[in-house]
Image (cartoon, helix red, strand yellow):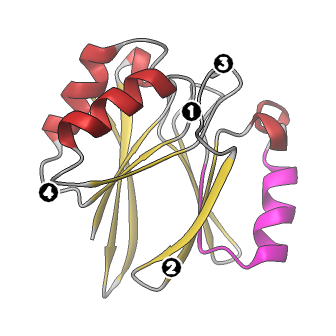
Amino acid sequence: MRILVLSDSHRNNMNLFSAITEEPTAEVVYFLGDGANEFEEASLIYGKEQAFIGVRGNCDLHTSLPETDTRTLCDKKIFATHGYLQNVKLGLTDLQLEAVKEKYDIVLFGHTHKPKSVYKDGIYYFNPGSLNEGCYGVIDITPNGVICINKKL
């Protein structure tokens, strides 16, 4: 399964739509906040072909998106958050404590605008970077394991 991971579009519809069209084989699109309006528009346009999962960011004031999302895909427990609630700008400590406690396999976060991919203690921590700056990510869940890739438009 291919998962497209997007975050921090900050009203840049063009980059959001470009990233979605760049990855036509993605079955799921995660959006990690700070651009909820664009994400909701994209889900209306592209949502028939892919599953769209979104969470709110600290700049998303008028949205019904949740603050976090937890679900299992391909036997992997995935946690999605924008990251401001877990203080990710100060490091991954709070996120790691929660991930270990809740036994997540993959943790998705944004907020810092910096692409990051870390594998620690059996957990993948993945930040696609800022879509407004042309960064996005792809995760492939295969029978041989998980592959996290940071990309640029």
Taking 7 as reference, is 140 above or below it? below
Is residue 105 depicted above or below 50 in this figure? below
Q: Which residues are magenta?
A: 92-108
Q: Residue 25, which numbered label?
A: 4
Q: Which residue is mark 3?
A: 59
Mark 2 vs mark 3, foreground winner is 3
Q: Nearer the viewer, residue 45 or 5?
A: 45
Quadrant of the image occupied by residue 42: top left
Q: Please name the residue that numbered disc 2 is placed on.
A: 76
Q: Nearer the viewer, residue 151 or 45?
A: 45
Q: Are marks 2 and 3 in contact (CB under 8 Å)?
A: no
Please, what is the three-letter code of the amino acid marked with disc 4? Thr
Q: Is residue 133 left or right of residue 42?
A: right
Does residue 101 show up magenta in the picture? yes
Determine crowd level at label 3: few under 14, some 14-19, many 20+ residues with C-alpha closer than 10 A: few
Q: Amino acid at mark 1?
A: Gly
The total of numbered circles placed on residues is 4
Q: Amino acid at mark 3?
A: Cys
**Mark nearer the N terminus (2 vs 3):** 3
SS of the residue under disc 3: loop
Residue plotted at (42% across, 16% down)? 132
Circle 1: is it few (<14), some (14-19), or many (20+) Cα within 10 Å? many
